[in-house]
Image (cartoon, coloured by chain):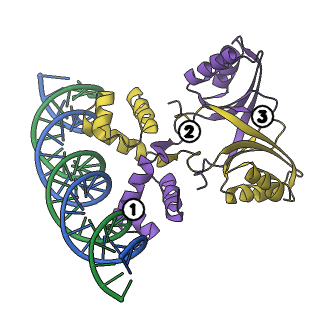
Chain colours: A yellow, B purple, C blue, D green
DNA sequence: GCCAATTCGCGTAGAATTCACAAAAACGGA
DNA sequence: TCCGTTTTTGTGAATTCTACGCGAATTGGC
């Protein structure tokens, strides 16, 4: 289980993974060796699954962010796996979830422009046999940027 | 602008930010010094906005992931700012967007359990003066985990 | 009060990053 | 084609960080 210091350490690492053991120690009132050991432990026990670089989507040329809701025509395990493979293979689909409620799937999508989003919907998703209905909502503003997990 | 090697470097850093300059060099057929220099350049020019640790939500005790759609009662700039402050202050709200379509806001939320999600909706969001309607969809399965941005 | 076990801090060895410098390549003009 | 300039590339040294081991201290149980 995690104590308060672990949680604060995880929060700090989510904000900035390049903090050194000494930085962490100062921030948490710990000696550098302890801070380092705690991080090692949290990594080994699987609390930290990895370290990633965060990119500026605009700088990367991804001007359009959207959410796409998808309903499938038929609901068998084979169709589901089929669709899962499809979204896994499309790099512009950042994440995909199955939700309670009307839509079967929610996709989070980054595209270079609206043309690309349109192409994704009409030339990739809709032609797929199992896809019955697609509804896209374009992001106008990200009010809160991807924040660290509450720990 | 980015060339192909830059894009592959950014993709690699999104998968694993702890790759060393030598690792990057081997992966991209570059000398370690060049790989390091490219990374420095991409950081300095703002393509990389930071490095973050990725956590296992389950391990962190966050068993419930949900999307919450919110409609505001009135649509003035003051109300919008008010609501933006609210979501910014709630740690269980990971991200928030304004979208085209029916709902004014979409919130991505991580909670420890359904009770917490319920509390968030009925004791935080709904009592807020500007909030007119709240509709939550619980994530049953994350078909595609948060993937790197397409570069 | 004593002993065991865990935790803590320090020091060292290995590795990575960063910077500067020199060589090589690319480029442009005469 | 040749030469001077500019940019790029590789190497090396200095600094810094991480990982690991060892001795000391603190904690907990009996």
Name which residue lies at 41% across and 34% down.
Answer: A12
Q: On the same chain: label 1 and label 2?
A: yes
- In the picture of the structure, the residue carrying the numbered disc 1 is B35
- In the picture of the structure, the residue carrying the numbered disc 3 is B100
Q: Does the image show residue A47?
A: no
Q: In which quarter of the image is the N terminus of chain A?
A: top left
Q: Is residue A82 left or right of residue A62?
A: right
Q: Give the quarter of the image for residue C26.
A: bottom left
Of the image marks 2 and 3, the number of the one nearer the N terminus: 2
Q: What element carries label 2?
A: loop
Name which residue lies at 69% across and 20% down.
Answer: B121
Q: Position of residue C24 (x, y in %)?
A: 30, 77
Query: In the image, which is nearer the foreground, mark 1 or mark 2?
Result: 1
Q: Is mark 1 on a helix, strand or loop?
A: helix
Chain of the residue displaying label 2? B
Q: Give the quarter of the image for residue B89.
A: top right
CA separation in Å, label 1 and label 2: 33 Å
Residue A109 position (above or below residue B115): below
Q: Position of residue B87 (x, y in %)?
A: 61, 23
- In the picture of the structure, the residue carrying the numbered disc 2 is B57
Residue count near mark 2 (Cα–Cα under 10 Å), binned few <14, some 14–19, many ≥20: many
Q: On the same chain: label 2 and label 3?
A: yes
Name which residue lies at 41% across and 58% down.
Answer: B38
């Amino acid at each position: 289980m995690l104590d308060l210091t672990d949680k604060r350490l995880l929060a700090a690492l989510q904000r900035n993974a390049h903090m050194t053991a000494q930085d962490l120690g100062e921030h948490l009132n710990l000696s550098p060796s302890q801070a380092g050991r705690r991080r090692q432990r949290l990594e080994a026990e699987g609390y930290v699954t990895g370290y990633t670089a965060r990119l500026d989507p605009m700088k990367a040329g991804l001007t359009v962010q959207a959410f796409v809701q998808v309903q499938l025509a038929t609901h068998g395990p084979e169709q589901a796996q089929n669709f899962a493979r499809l979204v896994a293979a499309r790099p512009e689909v950042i994440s995909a979830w199955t939700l309670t409620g009307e839509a079967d799937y929610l996709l989070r999508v980054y595209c270079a422009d609206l043309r690309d989003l349109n192409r994704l919907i009409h030339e990739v998703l809709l032609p797929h046999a199992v896809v019955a209905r697609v509804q896209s909502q374009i992001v106008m503003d990200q009010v809160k940027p991807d924040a660290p997990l509450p720990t």
